[in-house]
Image (tube, rainbow, N blue to C red):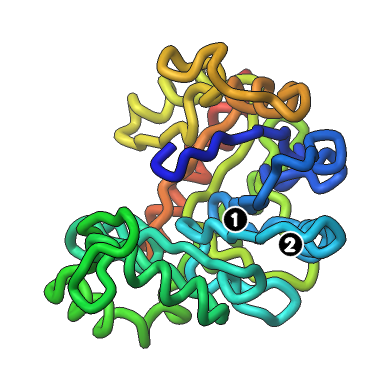
Amino acid sequence: EATGASAVVVDLESDFFTLDPALLQGAYSREVKAVVAVHIYGQPSKIDEIKDFCSENELFLIEDTAQAHGARFQGARLGSIGDVGTFSCYPTKNFGAIGDGGLIVTDNKDLAEKMRMIREYGWKDRVSAIKGRNSRLDEIQAAVLNVKLPHLDEDNQKRRNIADIYDQLSSDNFITPARRQNCDHVFHLYVCKTKYRDQLIKFLNERDIFPGIHYIQPIHLQPAYLNDLELGSKLTVTESICNEIISLPMYPELPISDAQAVCSAIKEFFRDL
């Protein structure tokens, strides 16, 4: 909205929760300027096919890497594949500061210059040549991130180790996250699907285990955006999975014994169904 642009929303791949490239052509029009590919939960989107579509139609490709710091697609770091990569550094993210913050990267010199202007009042030689804002990363957050960056891959591996433990829960009644081949999932969140979600959450809460739901309701059905978003496809997958998704506890410092306890409790729930 800040740019005067509006979003055209398309549905997901049911296995990976990421944008379905097969739906892009049906959502395309000459008014479209860019595609935003969200690497949700730490899982790389099918960025090669999305990039091909953008190249064929002369569109910018923006990677939303807010939940996938350090992840790779076929060896390439996410955020480096499109024209622009964006990163959230909110404290709970894989690469988090101690307060709000974010990063944006590009290898396009013209875009880089304009983004630097926009983040600081639209200044060029300290005069607002274009409309901008005050959106600089403050020095304290930058200092914290500089210290944490060398540990990112190590922390992501700890997340994968926890995910490997949770993977043993896979069953017809409890579907664990799929992992795209030749890619590195960094498990910002470990999101499963089950038709027994609400009963399972109650069962786990009674045992002092508190899973989450990311996210409770699709944005196009939320009051602020109801009937206000253009849909580029039916969102049947999105609407369906929001009733089934459950996020298990996930952070690098989670003790392996706690992850095993989560597994034991979930196995007990389904054994007693």
Q: Nearer the viewer, residue 235 or 243?
A: 235
Q: Is residue 17 left or right of residue 211?
A: right
Q: Element at badge 2?
A: helix
Q: Nearer the viewer, residue 201 or 220?
A: 220
Q: How packed is label 1: few (under 14 Cα within 10 Å), some, or many (20 or more)?
A: many
Q: Is residue 33 above or below residue 119?
A: above
Q: Nearer the viewer, residue 85 or 135?
A: 135
Which image quarter is the C terminus in?
top right
**Image x and y of residue 210, in percent:** 35, 35
Q: Is residue 96 visible?
A: yes
What residue is at 36 percent from the left and 87 percent from the top?
A: 150
Q: Is residue 67 left or right of residue 196?
A: left
What residue is at 70 percent from the left and 44 percent from the top?
A: 32
**Image x and y of residue 184, in percent:** 65, 70
Q: Quadrant of residue 42?
A: bottom right
Q: Which residue is mark 1?
A: 39
Q: How far is the residue under mark 1 from the one under mark 2? A: 9 Å
Q: Is residue 218 left or right of residue 130?
A: right
What residue is at 54 percent from the left and 65 percent from the top?
A: 186
Identity, as a three-letter code, of the amino acid under mark 1: His
Q: Which residue is mark 2?
A: 47
Identity, as a three-letter code, of the amino acid under mark 2: Ile
**Image x and y of residue 165, in percent:** 57, 58
Q: How packed is label 2: few (under 14 Cα within 10 Å), some, or many (20 or more)?
A: many
Q: Is residue 245 above or below residue 229?
A: below
Q: Are marks 1 and 2 in contact (CB under 8 Å)?
A: yes
What residue is at 47 percent from the left and 63 percent from the top?
A: 86
**Image x and y of residue 153, in percent:** 47, 80
Q: Nearer the viewer, residue 74 or 130?
A: 130
